[in-house]
Amino acid sequence: MATQIIIMKFMNIANILYRSLSITSSTIIPKSILKNEDKTIQKRLLYWTNIIGFVQGVVFLNFGKYVHIFTNDVNVIHLLKTISKYVCIYQYLDGLHSVIEGILQGYQSFILPSTISFLLYIPMFYFIQISNNLIDLWIYINSFMMLKNVMYYIILTKKNMVKKIKCR
């Protein structure tokens, strides 16, 4: 439990940048559509999402070296080092999900992404209940987050295709 609390506190701090990009994207996209610059804005937002993900990944992977500042429990430190790569993957996928969701909100797309999220949470809750350890839990969550990102990206590319057809 202590390991999970330490991880969640770090993730709360790290999510600030992703949430900022998400909120920014949901307000910038509608304005950029009028100027036909929305594709450029999307690329910039996703570029910065990747940069933030890389930097946060490096920080978190090295966090294990400094975790002794927060706890001296050997089991917590070992478990944190063991699951840090899974947490890094999740942190990036969650940030990407947040930014893509913000972009979709900028396109006024709410129902389909919400439906996908709802439908994916049902099996995810089941797998969380049957997980035997913290590593399994993070693997399940990462799998569902990756699936959600793929679906969101498909929706985003479809939105871009519809926009191109309407412009012609």
Image (cartoon, helix red, strand yellow):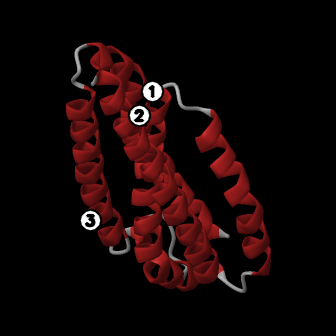
Q: Is residue 33 left or right of residue 128?
A: left
Which residue has dot 1 on it? Answer: 107
* Of residues 77 and 165, the one drawn nearer to the viewer in this rendering: 165
* Of residues 93 and 163, the one drawn nearer to the viewer in this rendering: 163
Q: Amino acid at mark 1?
A: Tyr
Q: Do the residues bearing badges 1 and 2 touch, measured as CB atoms within 8 Å? A: yes
At x 41% / y 67%, what residue is drawn?
A: 89
**Visible in this render: residue 13?**
no
Q: Residues within 10 Å of mark 1 (few under 14, many from 20)?
A: many
At x 41% / y 34%, what residue is drawn?
A: 103
Q: Residues within 10 Å of mark 3 (few under 14, many from 20)?
A: few
Which residue has dot 3 on it? Answer: 58
Provide the secondary structure element on which disc 1 rests.
Answer: loop
Q: Earlier in the sequence, mark 3 or mark 2?
A: 3
**Quarter of the image with the C terminus in it:** top left
At x 47% / y 46%, what residue is drawn?
A: 155
Q: Earlier in the sequence, mark 3 or mark 1?
A: 3
| Badge nearest the viewer, 3 or 1 | 1
Percent from the top left, x then y, of residue 97?
47, 49
Percent from the top left, x then y, of residue 1?
67, 70
Alpha carbon distance from label 3 to label 2 = 26 Å
Alpha carbon distance from label 1 to label 2 = 7 Å
Which residue has dot 2 on it? Answer: 103
Q: Residues within 10 Å of mark 2 (few under 14, many from 20)?
A: many
* Of residues 71 and 106, the one drawn nearer to the viewer in this rendering: 106
Give above or below for 34 relative to 156. above
Alpha carbon distance from label 3 to label 1 = 33 Å
| Badge nearest the viewer, 3 or 2 | 2
Q: Amino acid at mark 2?
A: Ile
